[in-house]
Image (cartoon, rainbow, N blue to C red):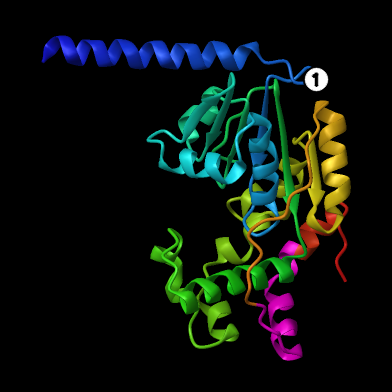
Amino acid sequence: MIFKSFYNLTKSLSYNMYCKCLSYSYNINNFKNIYHFHIRKTGGSSINYMFLSLSGIKSDVLIEKLSKKYNHSLIINNQLYTGWNLDLLNKGNFYYGFSHYPFSLVKLKDSTYSFTIFRDPAKRVLSHYNMLLGFTKNGINHPCMTSEKNWVGKNFLEFLDRIPKNHLLNQLNMFSSTFDINEAVDNVNKLNNYFQLEDFDNCIKSLNKDLNLNLKKMHIKKSKFEYRIKDHEMNYLKDLLKEEYKFLSLIGFNYN
């Protein structure tokens, strides 16, 4: 029993050391790693799938393997993919890494290329509602439903009253845990690049140029439910999102 435990420990240490050495060996157009600050409902899943496809394995297969792996990290053809594991991400153990963790918790090395994607705030929140509505109506037991199914309520206005502020203003909150607009702007400017979903083609083109890659355009996870928001609901929603709209205008994205 003692020998087996020692063997497992040695094996684990060896694997971790191999991952560290592998991550250090990368040269991605003069970067060691690529990290995506994945803001929910901004097209980020499509971006993740595009990078995962570089492994030579179908993206949907690889994302499922990553989600089921105990440490959410896999080596495919000498490329290390890591998602949702804050410890490994902060150690720089990845070729491509991603998560929903806020900027304040992710401590990237200077050699890491970091980026994110933004979206019209109202459309992003509406997309979140459509997703949860679809999961609810179809009885889909997605992991997020454990904490979010009760947000749906009886109608859209009830959803807006129930959704927590950090999810409502998720784009602002990603870069400032206190919703401080100036802090968020400063943190975004520390990224290597940032894009908007509304200009997705340019996003792919810029990523390919910055990293000397050949990413292929993909679109996934489009909800089949599209709630037709009423004018008074949209006005109420935009009023709730005014801080986020101001933040986005300061980094160059003006949504009218």
Quarter occupied by residue 155: bottom right
Quarter holding the N terminus is: top left
Q: Position of residue 84 (x, y in %)?
A: 50, 40
Residue 68 visible? The answer is yes
Quarter occupied by residue 80: top right
Residue drawn at x 50%, y 17% is 19
Q: Position of residue 4 (x, y in %)?
A: 18, 14
Extent of the magenta region: 226-244
Q: Which residue is mark 1?
A: 29
Q: Position of residue 185 (x, y in %)?
A: 76, 47
Quarter occupied by residue 255: bottom right
Q: Secondary structure at mark 1?
A: loop
Q: Position of residue 182 (x, y in %)?
A: 74, 50
Q: Nearer the viewer, residue 93 or 49?
A: 49
Q: Does the stretch in magenta take in 108?
A: no
Q: Nearer the viewer, residue 213 or 165?
A: 213
User: Quick check: 18 left or right of 205?
Assistant: left
Is residue 15 positioned above or below 192 on the image?
Answer: above
Label 1 packing within 10 angstroms: few (<14), some (14-19), many (20+): few
Residue drawn at x 61%, y 13% is 24
Residue drawn at x 68%, y 32% is 54
